[in-house]
Image (cartoon, rainbow, N blue to C red):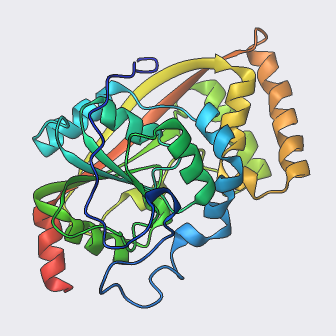
Amino acid sequence: MTNSPPQQPRPPRQTPPVQTAGPEADRGPVPPAGAPAGALAGALAGSPRARSFDAAAAQYAAARPTYPPALFDAVEEITGRTLRGARVVDVGAGTGISSGLLAGRGARVTAVEPGAGMAREFRRALPEIPLVRGVGDALPLAGGWADLITYAQSWHWTDPARSLPEAARVLRPGGSLALWWNAADYSVPWLAAQGARFRQWIPEWTNGSPGAARELPAEFPAVHRILRWTRSVPLTTHLDNIGSHSLLLTLGRDRAAELLDRERAELLKVFPGGTVPEAYTVELTVTTTEAARRHRIRNP
């Protein structure tokens, strides 16, 4: 178990070879040359639930959990290379939680984010990291450039039929694709009880677990890891974290506030001091360029 990792010095800003023109912070989602018509129109990243994060970007940045150092150790072990100096594309970068940690490990990070509100928060917090507006289904980056493509809490917003070939296109030979999610650790009794309450209120509730979205097609052999860690936060931060999930953001302000007030009352019975010991499982999936290359050959 570990608490929030310390930030480390970040490397100098590196500009990626983008395929479109215009200022980085303002560039909207633009498909690369040769992308199929309608690739963005049908993207899950444009759904109402995905768009809901823009209005709550500051809350997301303040309340969402970070990731433990063990996650990045595992990525280095599985991929067989250090993050220091690696060209990393962080897709669905949001407010920059993952991008900042990757840069802190010495990676040369380029962030890709479709949402205007999330991109503004990212730029405010991490002005030294290049940011382009786009989606994983149609990455606005040159081919064969990246050592590693990462999706933190965001792969389930893509269409794998498009995002996997795009990863294959942008990755260099020997590169890797890493997907991860922070999910509530339901082996902890109070979290299991919380999950049960929210599933009564919102049947689709998962609180971070990707479910089947974590699985890749058979032609992409993957390594899976589960990592556990904890953080202690004020009750208000814990509730703001829950409230930043798309199922709450799209529920309607009054109904969401009602449910969070009910949850506050339940948690004060368990944690009367007002400090909540959150417990997480990081669900990590990694696949390699060689598998992606074979898929690209079959699906040119």
Q: 162 or 184: which is nearer to us?
A: 162
As drawn, which residue projects farthest toward the bottom?
A: 37
Residue 276 lies left or right of residue 6; in this view the side is right
Residue at position x 84%, y 42% from top? Answer: 259
Residues 234 and 55: in front is 55
Answer with the quarter of the image where residue 278 lies.
top right
Residue 212 visible to an observer of this rendering = no
Left-right relation of 56 to 251: left
Q: Quadrant of the N terminus?
A: top left
Residue 225 coordinates in the image, percent (x, y): 29, 40
Residue 3 visible from this viewpoint:
yes
**How many numbered discs?**
0
Residue at (44, 83) in percent of width and height: 39
- Position of residue 264 in the picture relative to residue 146 (left or right): right
Q: Position of residue 52 (x, y in %)?
A: 68, 58
Q: Is residue 44 above or below residue 238?
A: below
Q: At 35% from the left edge and 60% from the top edge, which residue is drawn?
A: 215
Question: What residue sits 23% from the left and 66% below the top?
Answer: 170
Which of the pair 50/260 is nearer the observer? 50
- Residue 160 sits in quarter: bottom left
Instruction: Give percent across and percent down for residue 7.
Output: 39, 22
Instruction: Name the quadrant of the C terminus.
Output: bottom left
Relative depth, front residue between 265 and 149 = 149
Looking at the image, is 50 positioned above or below residue 298? above
252 in relation to 6, above or below: below
Would you say 66 lies left or right of 165 here? right
Residue lying farthest top? 273
**x and y percent of residue 135 in the render?**
44, 67
